[in-house]
């Protein structure tokens, strides 16, 4: 063995011995303490209540909200297969009630996450081509783009008429600095 693993092993031994000593001292203290001494240590009832409430909220969040959703995201097919009967029964019994309560309460972020999940599922399909996948992704990223970044105000538009020769249209395109120049008919609306 080299020096580094021996030092690490020695540190673990020292930590193990210290932990064993602390646990031994705690065991003896639990056996020797009286009820009166323990009663003096307990916080007021409202502090115990608030602490218990806080711990319950955190545990409920982790056990009911975060952990199951993580499992559902990581293994959607296995989760759906295992819970299909339960989900069908609950939907049949309470589906209308849930839809009525949730109507109009979705947030933009929830809608966006649902849309991203749908696009991800579609992108994984073999039916969709690579160009279509790229288009879906770019549409989702378009939501983060300001309109001013991709559009020119109508008063600042540079246009060319449909009867303009190609040479002049190319010169206009080069001078304007825009990547696109609308070709119009009788008016800008045409």
Image (cartoon, rainbow, N blue to C red):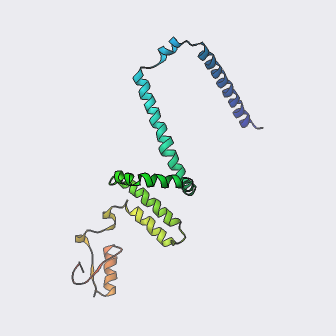
Q: Is residue 71 left or right of residue 51?
A: right
Quarter placement of the N terminus: top right
Which residue is at a point 41% across and 21% down the rendered structure image? 45
Nearer to the camera, 23 or 42: 42
Quarter in which the C terminus is drawn: bottom left
Q: In this view, does 13 lie above or below 73?
A: above
The residue drawn where x is 67% and y is 24% is 20
The residue sitting at 43% across, 56% down in the picture is: 113
Task: Name the one closer to the observer, 133 or 184.
Answer: 133
Residue 108, how many percent across, how many down? 36, 55
Residue 27 placement (x, y as % from top left): 63, 19
Quarter holding residue 109: bottom left
The residue lying at 47 percent from left, 18 percent from top is: 42
Label count reads 0
Residue 130 to residue 37: above or below? below
Residue 122 vertical placement versus 25 (above, below):
below
- Residue 60: where, in percent of width, then height? 47, 39
The quarter holding residue 169 reads bottom left
């Amino acid at each position: 063995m080299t020096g580094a693993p021996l030092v690490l092993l020695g540190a673990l031994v020292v930590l193990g011995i210290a932990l064993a000593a602390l646990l031994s001292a705690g065991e003896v203290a639990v056996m020797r303490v009286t009820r009166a001494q323990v009663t003096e240590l307990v916080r007021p009832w409202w502090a115990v209540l608030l602490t218990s409430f806080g711990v319950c909220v955190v545990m409920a969040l982790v056990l009911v909200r975060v952990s199951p959703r993580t499992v559902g995201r990581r293994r959607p097919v296995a989760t759906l297969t295992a819970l299909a009967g339960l989900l069908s029964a609950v939907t049949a019994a309470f589906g209308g009630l849930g839809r009525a309560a949730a109507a109009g309460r979705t947030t933009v972020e929830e809608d966006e996450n649902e849309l991203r999940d749908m696009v991800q599922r579609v992108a994984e399909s073999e039916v969709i081509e690579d160009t279509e996948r790229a288009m879906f992704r770019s549409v989702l990223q378009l939501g983060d783009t300001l309109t001013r970044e991709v559009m020119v105000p109508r008063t600042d538009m540079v246009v060319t008429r449909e009867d303009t020769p190609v040479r002049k249209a190319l010169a206009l395109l080069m001078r304007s600095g825009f990547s696109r120049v609308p070709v119009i008919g009788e008016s800008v609306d045409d």
